[in-house]
Image (tube, rainbow, N blue to C red):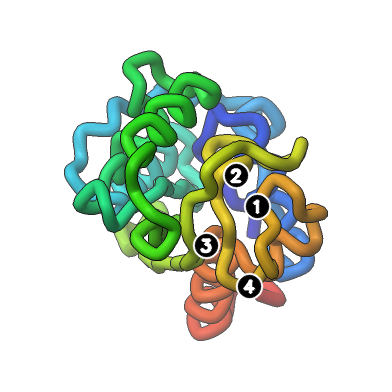
Amino acid sequence: MNFILATHNLKKREELARILAPLGVRVLTAEEAGVTLTDVEETGTTFEENAVLKAESGCRESGMPCVADDSGLEVDALGGAPGVYSARYAGAHGNDGKNIDKLLDALRDVPREARGARFVCTVCCAFPDGTRIVTRGVCGGSIAFARSGDGGFGYDPVFLPDDALGQSMASLSDAQKDAISHRRRALEKLAQKLREKGIGNA
């Protein structure tokens, strides 16, 4: 069974495809499937609501099972912000540099011990028969005082995962990041649910 992936974020698409491939799920981009997917307005107030909106829209438009995710950063000292507004925290959607600048400025006077944070990912897989699977993954950590590392995207340069011995997410290799990422954890739960449905080798 082929699945279509609902995202226009090229780096996220690469990461999702990389993680899902060894799970036995064949994921196609909209271009590979020969369909055009609407860029859904993310009007949900939770990661789950936004993931469901995107997956169900992609499923309707393609007629295929559709996988979509919504993810972001929650910072304790900011009451869980930027949350669902992570990609547009500084105003313009997807301006990683400005988003990080705003975050570091907001945390300027916050001490190390109070800079706890987590990356959250909710994945939804919507099927043409109307059923859907929704899973959630979390990667705990803290916010650094400055950027480090050249990899990843989004807030990776300032996010210090609990499992990375002080390295930022952007300093890790793809394999190291995949092993601990919120997206990996959500997708592994999705794979288990697919297994239970008897789909593919997932």
Q: Which residue is mark 4?
A: 163
Q: Quadrant of residue 97?
A: top right
Type of amino acid under label 4: Asp
Instruction: Return the x and y of residue 66 as percentages of the image width and height.
Output: 49, 48
Q: Which image quarter is the C terminus in? A: bottom right
* Alpha carbon separation for disc pair 2 and 3: 12 Å
Sequence order check: which comes first, mark 4 or mark 3? Answer: 4
Question: Looking at the rendered structure, which numbered label has been put on residue 169?
Answer: 1
Q: Disc 1 vs disc 4: Cβ atoms closer than 8 Å?
A: no
* Alpha carbon separation for disc pair 2 and 1: 5 Å
Q: Nearer the viewer, mark 3 or mark 1?
A: 1
Q: At 41% across and 46% down in the image, what residue appears?
A: 72
Sequence order check: which comes first, mark 2 or mark 3? Answer: 2
Q: Which residue is mark 2?
A: 156
Q: Residues within 10 Å of mark 4 (few under 14, many from 20)?
A: some
Left or right of 154, for residue 33: right
* Alpha carbon separation for disc pair 3 and 1: 11 Å
Q: At 40% across and 64% down in the image, what residue appears?
A: 113
Instruction: State the SS at label 1.
Output: helix
Q: Which residue is mark 3?
A: 182
Question: Looking at the rendered structure, which numbered label has been put on residue 86?
Answer: none
* Alpha carbon separation for disc pair 4 and 3: 12 Å
